[in-house]
Image (cartoon, grey):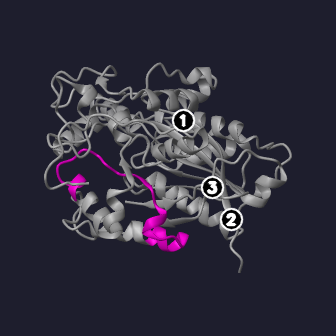
Amino acid sequence: MQLRRVVITGLGALTPIGNTLQEYWEGLVSGRSGAAPISRFDASKFKTRFACEVKGFDAEQFMDRKEARKMDPYAQYAVVVADEAIKDSGLDLDKADKDHIGVIWGSGIGGLKTFQDECIGFAKGDGTPRFNPFFIPKMIADSASGLISMRHGLRGPSYVTVSACASGNNALIDAFNNIRLGLCTAVVSGGSEAAIYEAGVGGFNALHAMSTRNDDPATASRPYDKDRDGFVLGEGGAAIILEDLEHAKARGAKIYCEVIGGGMSSDAYHITAPHPEGIGVFLCMKNAMADARISANDVDHINTHGTSTPIGDPQELKAIQQLFGEQAYRMNICSTKSIRGSKSPSGSGFRISRCTDRHCATAAPYRTIGRTSRTMSVSSSWAMPFSTPW
């Protein structure tokens, strides 16, 4: 069968450096860090006392109070960015075939605040169960896609992918495949996270995964720097409208770029640590390039996972060097996590930045690399071409 071509026609963002797509882009271009001392709870006894929080967000500006209270923050973020992306795409949902528009979302954790609050409330009681009737619907990761589909009456496939930091990427690849196989004409995709609460910060601290550079939060996330000491926890949401090219052209849509391939793989090595040789990363990029039918010389930019962890960064660069050879030293390699933190939101945020790079013909700066290690001389992947005629 002839595969359909897939393009991106809408974007939405709610991030630690901006609460709209435009604000996010301006934050990236300015190089402004989203990291600051945690304001949401008293973190004075935690090893890490800072994070990349969303700032100045009020869900009741986008929905009524009763509706907002039925959603965990991660789901509120999802609904808000999906609204922005749909508006940005120009899709007229009153005229569209909603039976063939889906919602495929990504979230690595889901409703952590809801789970924490309900468990604490029960623990403080006398053992009598007095749980909120919305406890389970608010907590599960799958609620985000359902809320978006119900809000807009979208009756295509609706589900959430859960694969830690790759959740948003996996959602986008699933959306891409649903469209190119002709199962959907458009998909609302992306991801959202809201884990900056006691359980989230404490849990990641227990893994010794986060930076403890409490004296200088703004430079704590420093991918590939010699003195990196862990990731900085972030949060937010990012939405991307993927659409059948012919459908987009027929309605005169603005097209940001075309998606031409996607790849997935597994390390099959350790529950948290990457394979020492970067096998999973290598296979993932290799699979994406094979699917897109492009060569190493066709790739000029990689926005890496780049979490600023001592173990993760070297293996990722090792995989890039192995796959791209000399081209690795000619391409641009960066990580937006140096500005917005990690898990904000499960991989979709840097797709937004790359799409906006292309649309604005401007590249965003990335901060905090001070000293690179001698061992570093230079997850899910997908590919987007440059100047393809629509």
Q: Which residues are magenta?
A: 287-314
Q: As displayed, is residue 303 above or below residue 157?
A: above
Numbered disc in front, either 3 or 2? 3
- In depth, the one of 321 and 307 nearer the eye is 321
Numbered mark located on residue 318 in the image: none
Residue 327 visible in the picture: yes
For label 1, the residue is 13
In the image, is residue 312 part of the stretch drawn in magenta? yes
In the image, is residue 351 part of the stretch drawn in magenta? no
Residue 338: percent from the left, percent from the top?
32, 37
Residue 124: percent from the left, percent from the top?
27, 28
How many numbered marks does the figure carry? Answer: 3
- In depth, the one of 134 and 249 nearer the eye is 249
Numbered mark located on residue 5 in the image: 2
Secondary structure type for disc 2: loop
Residue 167: percent from the left, percent from the top?
44, 54
For label 3, the residue is 387
Q: Residue type at mark 1?
A: Ala
Q: Tell me the residue at 64%/23% (across/down).
A: 64
Q: Tell me the residue at 23%/57% (across/down).
A: 272
